Structure formats: C-alpha cells, structure tokens
Image (tube, rainbow, N blue to C red):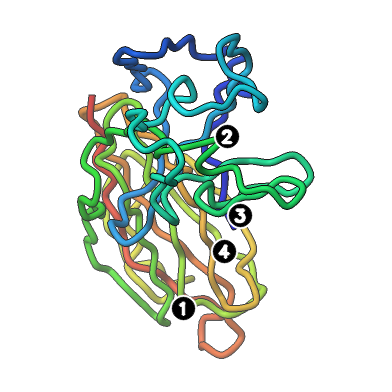
Amino acid sequence: MLGTKVFDMENDYLTSVQVITHGINEVDMSAYNVIVGNDASKKFVVAFRSSFNPWCTCGSACQVNFFTDFDGVSPFVCHTTPKTSLIDIQGQGWRDASVATVSGFPLCPIYFNGNWVIRACTENAGAPPVCQPDLGYHGPGDVEIQVCGQPLSTGNVASFDLTKADPNVAAYIFASPYFSPVYSSLLGSIFCPVPVLLTVILPTDATGKISLPNMVPGGGGPFSFYVQAVTISGSLPYGVEVSNCLRLDLLP
C-alpha cells in the first residue's frame, strides 16, 4: 500500500513531462517545492504514467522503451529486482513488476523487463528537523508547543504541534512580533507575546494534542515572531494551562 500523495504534477499543474528513450532525461522539480519530510527512516515513491509511447505496446513487449535498465541480454530471464519497481495494472492496482501477472500470464520477462530508470534527488534528505527556539516561561500545567521542520526561509515549511493539554478543550494560540514578558494575574504565569497581534483558537483532540503538519510557512525575514498557547483546564487553580514561549525566526 502506498502512503499519502504529496504531489501530482498532472492534477496540481495540469502538465506532464516529455521524455525520450536511449537518453538521459532530467526534470527539475525545485520550482514545485515538493515536501516529502526529513525522516530518513521513511521512503517516498516516484510514480509516472506513460501516456504515449508509439514504440511499445503489450503485444510487442516493453523491454527497453519503457524506461528500464534492461540491456537486451538474456531476454527470457526476468531482470527486475523484487520489491523495487511497481506497476499499476488496471483492475489490480499497484503490483510488484517482478511478479505481476495479467490473466495469469507473468509480465516479466516477455512484456516487461528490468528496473525503472528513475532517480529522485532530494535536498537535505535525512537531515534532522530544525526546531524554533524555546524561550521557556512554561506553566502552570504541562502543555507544550513546538515548531519544527525546515529552516523558515522562503519556500520552506515547518509543523506546529501542541501536546500534553487536556483532551477536547479550546486552545488559544497567541502570536506577536513583540517580546515583552509580563506576569499575568489572570493566567498565573509569565506571558511573553505582548502586545498580542494574532489569536487563533483551535480544539485539542481526544489525546490533548493539536498537530498542524507543514502549516508554518517561511520567508519574509529576517524577522522574529513570538508564540505562546493557553489551554482550558478544569483541574488547575486558574482554569488554564500556559505553554512555553517560542521564537519563530523567519529568514529571507
């Protein structure tokens, strides 16, 4: 089973890629800012459909012109590495091309052979996420906020996460370009984004969390923003929990 789709050139940009056989095809995807994450333990899949190929049909075999590394040697031996190349077969979905069949007949080696010749180059693949500075001022309560992902430069994004709050309660997220820590008698805590210029109210889920993946855009800097959250809590004297204060460093 394939995971979440992060980019679809045909649907998102109404365009396709022109390629040729027996040559090197390069497609620069940097303009599309395709984000697949920074977790080195996770893999991503690049899939494509051959919309038009006059030199290849199922009847005449697709050993070379179907973008594979098959060199034509030993054509009756399957040279497709298991669990490497997938093929989307109508009525079946995605199948391992090394063992895929149609009407009981195996595609490899007669109708398909070799491995897909497609490589995906990524920037900072496997690099640890960058977390925005935590300035402290935490409590009362245990609720925490974090903004982690790519450095907040133009075209980059990071994720906002709130954890350790009460389940299914309102969370008030305050933001400001000003940093003036002051004690609030209403909160029983030090509040740092003063004066507040932006307030967002969101509900926590059944586990007391809020997750906004890749929803914090970068760019517009150099500039810093300060963020702190307050969540409703019936178990504390002031009726609220106050998170730590973050500084979001926006880059050019």
Per the rendering, the mark at residue 220 is none
Tell me how far mark 3 sits from mark 1, CA to CA.
17 Å
The mark closer to the camera, 4 or 1, is 1
- Viewer-proximal residue among 177 and 106: 106
Crowd tier of the residue under label 4, counting other residues whose Cα lies within 10 Å: few below 14, some 14–19, many 20 or above: many
Label at residue 111: 2
Helix, strand or loop for disc 2: loop
Tell me which label, 2 or 1, sits earlier in the chain: 2
Q: Residues within 10 Å of mark 2 (few under 14, many from 20)?
A: some
Q: Secondary structure at mark 1?
A: loop
Choose between 185 and 197: the one closer to the eye. 197
Q: Are marks 3 and 4 in contact (CB under 8 Å)?
A: yes
What is the number of the mark on residue 164? Answer: 1
Residue 236 place in picture, x, y as percent: 51, 88
Q: Nearer the viewer, mark 3 or mark 2?
A: 2
Q: Earlier in the sequence, mark 4 or mark 1?
A: 1
Q: Nearer the viewer, mark 4 or mark 2?
A: 2
Nearest the viewer among 101 and 140 is 101
* Real-space Cα separation, disc 4 to disc 1, in angstroms: 12 Å
Amino acid under label 3? Ile
Identify which residue is drawn at 36% across, 73% down.
Answer: 189
Precedes in sequence: disc 3 or disc 2? 2
**Marks 3/2: CA–CA distance:** 57 Å
Observer able to see residue 196: no
- Which quadrant would the C terminus be assigned to in this image? top left
Indicate which disc residue 201 carries. 3
Amino acid at dot 1? Lys
For label 4, the residue is 171
The quarter of the displayed image where residue 217 is located: top left
